[in-house]
Amino acid sequence: LVVRPNPFGYARLGLTVSRRTAARAVDRNRIKRLVRESFRAAQKRIAGNDVLVMARRQAVSTSNKTLRYSLEQHWKMLDNQ
């Protein structure tokens, strides 16, 4: 996660899941879908930030529940700043 403040009143999302990270398109799309869904739920809490999420190889073998929990922890950390 890379975070930078932006001059707008809303949060924006950047997302990278490369073929090197997840060879199969199904896996890349699953990760992106989960990140977008989680971001939409937290968007109002982290307003005023540009967030770049860069997936790692471990995300491919991690369950959806664990990925959601990890993302939620990141959003909470941003919310407290």
Image (cartoon, helix red, strand yellow):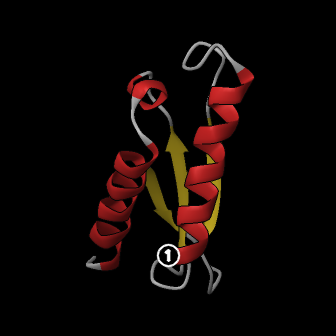
Q: Is residue 43 above or below residue 9?
A: above
Q: Position of residue 43 (x, y in %)?
A: 56, 77
Q: Please indicate whether residue 74 sits to the left or right of residue 56 in the image.
A: left
Q: Secondary structure at mark 1?
A: helix
Q: Toward the viewer: 41 or 80?
A: 41
Residue at 66% x, 50% y: name it: 33
Location of mark 1 (residue): 42
Residue 78 percent coordinates (x, y): 34, 70
Q: Residue furthest right?
A: 25
The answer to whether residue 36 is left or right of residue 68 is right
Q: Could you tell me residue 19's position as x and y percent?
A: 66, 16
Q: Amino acid at mark 1?
A: Ala
Decide: is 2 above or below 6.
above
Q: Is residue 1 left or right of residue 47?
A: left
Against 39, residue 32 (above or below) is above
- Residue 9 is situated, as x and y percent measured from the top left of the image, at 62, 87
- Residue at x-position 54% and y-position 85%: 44
Given residues 74 and 12, the one toward you in this image is 74
Q: Place residue 25 in its image quadrant.
A: top right
Closer to the camera, 11 or 68? 68
Tell me the residue at 58%/19% (across/down): 22
Q: Please state, as top left, top right, bottom left or bottom right, where the C terminus lies in the image.
A: bottom left
Residue at x 61%, y 31% (from the top left corner): 17
Q: Residues within 10 Å of mark 1 (few under 14, many from 20)?
A: some
In the rendered image of this protein, does residue 59 appear above or below residue 6? above
